[in-house]
Amino acid sequence: PLQHVLRYDLFALRIQKEDLRNLKETLEAVPETIHGEMVGNLRHVYKAFCWSPGMKGVKGRAMAFYHVMTAVAIVTGLDLPLYVREMICTEHGEEFVLTLLTREAQEKVLP
């Protein structure tokens, strides 16, 4: 989910079904520095997936709602409402937007 919005390569590994038998070796091949960066990035994107009441933005909606709206805007070509853009920038910060969002999402979110 949210592949249009988030840069998965910065916090996740994509493993093909046929490569699952080599999962241990694949994971062990990731250098510790890269692993540490990915874990740090995952801490930042956690809110993007969270629908729980404790992870609501200032307007009372789960942050995942705003990221889903961004994905819909990208797929449909529609503009994001200003309050959604402001919410993502306020809740996550500029570094998150510039680093962890896809170029398409950045174009929708940033003014």
Image (cartoon, helix red, strand yellow):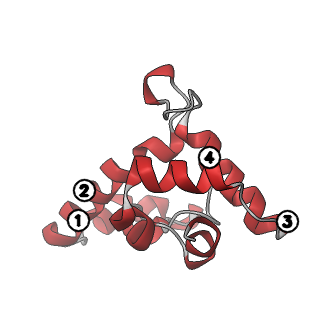
In this rendered view, identify the residue nearer to me: 1 or 64: 64
Residue at the spot of label 4: 66
| First-in-chain label (2 vs 3) | 2
In this rendered view, identify the residue nearer to me: 63 or 42: 63
Q: Residue at x 29, y 62 (%)?
A: 38
Amino acid at circle 3: Thr
Callout 4: SS: helix
| First-in-chain label (4 vs 1) | 1
Amino acid at circle 4: Tyr
Compute the Cα span from label 4 to label 2.
22 Å
Residue at the spot of label 1: 37
Callout 1: SS: helix
Callout 3: SS: helix
- Count neighbours of disc 3 (C-alpha within 10 A) and say few if under 14, some if 14 to 19, many if 20 or more: few
| Image location (x, y in percent) of residue 11 | 38, 61
Of circles 4 and 2, which is in front? 4
Compute the Cα span from label 4 to label 1.
25 Å
Q: Is residue 46 visible?
A: yes
Compute the Cα span from label 3 to label 4.
15 Å
- Furthest-top residue in view? 53
Amino acid at circle 2: Gly
Of circles 3 and 1, which is in front? 3
Residue at the spot of label 3: 76
Residue at the spot of label 2: 40
In this rendered view, identify the residue nearer to me: 34 or 79: 79
| First-in-chain label (4 vs 2) | 2
Q: Residue at x 38, y 65 (%)?
A: 94
Compute the Cα span from label 3 to label 1.
32 Å
Are the residues tagged 4 and 2 within 8 Å (C-beta)? no
- Count neighbours of disc 1 (C-alpha within 10 A) and say few if under 14, some if 14 to 19, many if 20 or more: few
